[in-house]
Image: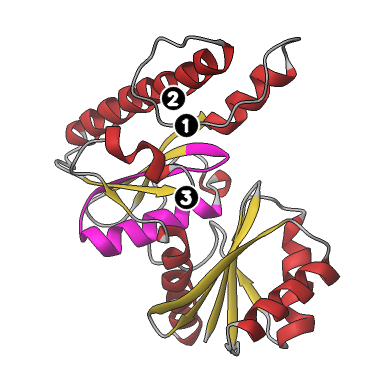
Amino acid sequence: MLLALDAGNTNITVGVFDGRKLVTQWRHLSASPDDLGRLLADQARRRSVSIDAAVYGSVVPKLDPVIERAVRSRFGVTAKAVTPKSRLGIALRVRRPGQVGADRLLNALAAHERSGGPAVVLDFGTATTFDCVADDGAYLGGAILLGPNLAAEALHRRTAKLPLVPVARLKRVIGRDTVECIEAGLYFGYLGMISEVLARTVGEMKQLGHDRPKLIATGGLAHLFKGDLPKKMEVVPDLTLEGLRIAHERMARGNKE
């Protein structure tokens, strides 16, 4: 039984795999080592799962020791970190490999396993990322955008009278009050931004010889935008967790070789 932790800027998403099957998952806000350890143990007990190994990917460096201490104290196992230096069996064809976030590596791993060829992953997180995968599974880079929830927070914090408005899917762009105007701007403005970046990304992939990449969306807001994304784009909510499982298998194999 593998404990997989995806530590993002807002939440820590946790999954438990029995072999290749994701049997349960949940989310936590960032917490202290004691609190996180207790929360992990309580959820594992509630779901009747025992833990034999652990792996994590983090984009928040200060959470790394928190996760490692929490997992060791509660389950007696060492949580292995996924980093650009991990033996994952993929090339990082970017200018500075050490700067590639763990979440982007994990998405690339899982996307190539699903597609068996080139892929573009659109991850709707605190920031929205585009990650490109070559025919042979190599990571090619991508783009990083401001997430819509961050845009909503910025509007609220940097203006005197605009309220904090949640991102929602709308049918019209002409708002009839302040809240509707913000909702329309957030949704359709963001949709236009990601549509343009996606179109240019697919075009550049073709120029690089990676024609017709598989399009995959993941992250918390993927389902919200699904209706206005290309029909051929597959929404895979657990893509990053799946990448953690694959990374754990490859790192274990690499240590034996």
For the residues bearing labels 1 and 2, Cβ distance under 8 angstroms: yes
Determine whether, in the image, residue 86 is placed left or right of residue 150.
Answer: left
- What amino acid type should be assigned to the residue bearing mark 2? Tyr
Question: Disc 1 marks which residue?
Answer: 168
Q: Single out the mark in the foreground, 3 or 2.
A: 2
Q: Position of residue 89 (x, y in %)?
A: 38, 66
Say if 37 sits above or below 156 in the image: below
Amino acid type, callout 3: Arg
Mark pair 1, 3: CA separation: 26 Å
Residue at x 78% of width, y 76% of height = 38
Residue 126, label in figure:
none
> Quarter of the image holding residue 90?
bottom left
Image quarter (top left, top right, bottom left or bottom right) of the C terminus? bottom left
Is label 2 in a helix, a strand or a loop? helix
- Between disc 1 and disc 3, whose residue precedes? 3
Q: Which mark is residue 187?
A: 2
Where disc 1 sits, the SS reads: loop
- Please say whether residue 155 is visible from this viewpoint: yes
Quadrant of res 171: top left
What is the x, y in percent for residue 239? 40, 59
- Residue 64 in magenta? no
Badge 3 vs badge 2, beta-carbon distance below 8 Å:
no
At x 32%, y 40%, the residue is 226
Is residue 62 rendered to the left or right of residue 201?
right
The stretch in magenta equals 102-128
248 left or right of 20?
A: right
Marker disc for residue 104: 3
Where is residue 42? Give x, y as percent: 71, 79
Which amino acid does the dot numbered 1 rest on? Ala
Q: Which residue occupies the foreground of this view, 141 or 54?
A: 54
